[in-house]
Amino acid sequence: MKYVVAGFLLLSAVVTTGLFVLRSRVGPGGDVAAIDARGNAQIEREREREARIANCEAWIGMTHEQLRRSWGRPQSFNASKTADGTSYQLVYKNDPNERPSTCGPRSIPDHAFVYVEGGLVTGINTYD
């Protein structure tokens, strides 16, 4: 942890799960006076997302990379190119050879279509 003295305020940056949390201290060796609540909220949201991925969940707003970590690779996909860019329809089937090892047999729907635009999941249709 590095300390930078700025007047009477001592600042330290702590790296936790790739996010920065700013802590301020009053004078050298003083107690923590304030913790950036937004930074802590971001860390908590990231922990919640990671727990959902570990539980093999998918949700609207997750990134394409998070979806791959949660459900594995799709069996197939369809790409649509428009003036606004490329969107994808990812086709998932509950195949034990394709799903991540952390997922049980019923953790992923039997059939699902996941829609991705701009790297984010925008829709999910499931069929059991």
Image (cartoon, rainbow, N blue to C red):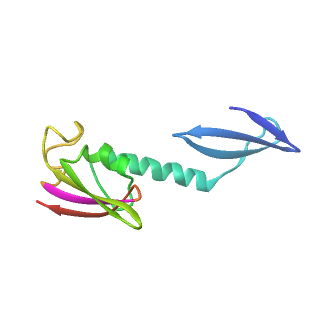
**Residue 2, placed above or below residue 120:** above
| Horizontal and vertical percent position of residue 68 | 30, 45
Residue nearest the viewer, comparing 64 with 82: 82
Q: Residue at x 23, y 53 (%)?
A: 77
Q: Residue at x 54, y 54 (%)?
A: 41
Q: Residue at x 60, y 56 (%)?
A: 38
Total marks shown come to 0
Residue nearest the viewer, comparing 115 with 95: 115
Residue nearest the viewer, comparing 21 with 78: 78
First to last magenta residue range? 111-117
Side of 63 relative to 108 (left or right): right
Side of 106 relative to 4 (left or right): left
User: Magenta stretch: residue 72 in it?
Assistant: no
Residue farthest toward the right in the current orientation of the protein: 7
Side of 26 relative to 84 (left or right): right
Identify the image quadrant of the C terminus: bottom left
| Horizontal and vertical percent position of residue 10 | 79, 41
| Horizontal and vertical percent position of residue 116 | 33, 59
**Residue 82, placed above or below residue 104:** below
Write down the quadrant of residue 127 in the picture: bottom left
Side of 56 relative to 9 (left or right): left
Identify the image quadrant of the N terminus: top right
Residue farthest toward the top in the current orientation of the protein: 1
Write down the quadrant of residue 6 in the picture: top right
User: Magenta stretch: residue 112 in it?
Assistant: yes
Q: Residue at x 19, y 54 (%)?
A: 91
Main SS, magenta region, reads strand
| Horizontal and vertical percent position of residue 99 | 20, 42
Residue nearest the viewer, comparing 121 with 117: 117
**Residue 62, placed above or below residue 17:** below
